[in-house]
Amino acid sequence: MEDQDKLQGHAWFTLSGDVNSDMVHRMFDAAADMSEDMVTDAHVLLQSNGGYVSDGICLYNYMSNLPIRFHMYNAGAVASIAVIVYLAGHKRYASSTARFMVHKSHASAPSGARPDALRIIVEGLQADDARTEEILRSHVQFSDEHWRIHAYSDLHLTAAEAVKVNMINKVTDFRPPAGHRITNI
């Protein structure tokens, strides 16, 4: 089988920026094009420091359930809710110099907020944490020490550490084959 035959149905993409409604809209449009182009395997280089929890969970659920195998790559930084988007990948890779960061949800209370308003903020943050932790636990095998750090601080992982906890399948670079288009989502 020739190399070109092996790559039939494969396409290469970059996706960067904040995880927000704009990124969701861009991914919806890109997935529609992928479907029309009969893409079976989408290789996506993700670069993001995070954003909104609900948008990240939407992307995770959407990408996880499409009839497209996503191969996710981290060549720099995938952090905060972007890690959840990244975990939608059927296969996941990172460059040796890439990093990951996960943390609990956070928000700033408005000045002069009353106790009932603060309670609503806290309940929303706890709900977001429960949703993201469920996804993390379904993909990643953090040690007890990792979970302790995650409970109170930012948890940073190198690519080598990410392999050990099954966040990635392999340390390797995003390397589209020569002559193939790379589409920015």
Image (spheres, helix red, strand yellow):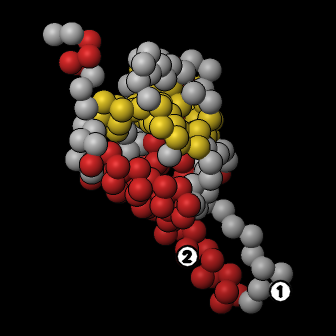
Which amino acid, mark 1?
A: Gly
Could you tell me which residue is drawn at 21 percent across and 10 percent down? 2
Work out whether 61 lies above or below 11.
below
In the figure, residue 164 lies in which quadrant? top left
Which quarter of the rendering shows the N terminus?
top left
Work out whether 136 lies above or below 71.
below
Does residue 75 appear anywhere in the picture? Answer: yes
Please report whichever mark, 1 or 2, sits nearer to the chain's N-terminal start. Answer: 1
Which amino acid, mark 2?
A: Glu
Residue 83, given in percent of the width and then of the height, sits at 51, 44
Residue 156, given in percent of the width and then of the height, sits at 63, 35
Q: Is residue 75 left or right of residue 13?
A: right
The numbered dot on residue 59 is none
Callout 1: SS: loop
Query: Is 38 in front, or is 151?
Result: 38
The numbered dot on residue 112 is 1
Q: Is residue 144 left or right of residue 60?
A: right
Callout 2: SS: helix
Residue 122, given in percent of the width and then of the height, sits at 61, 74
The numbered dot on residue 123 is 2
Q: Is residue 64 left or right of residue 184?
A: left
Give the residue furthest to the left. Answer: 1
Give the residue furthest to the right. Answer: 111
Work out whether 149 lies above or below 123.
above
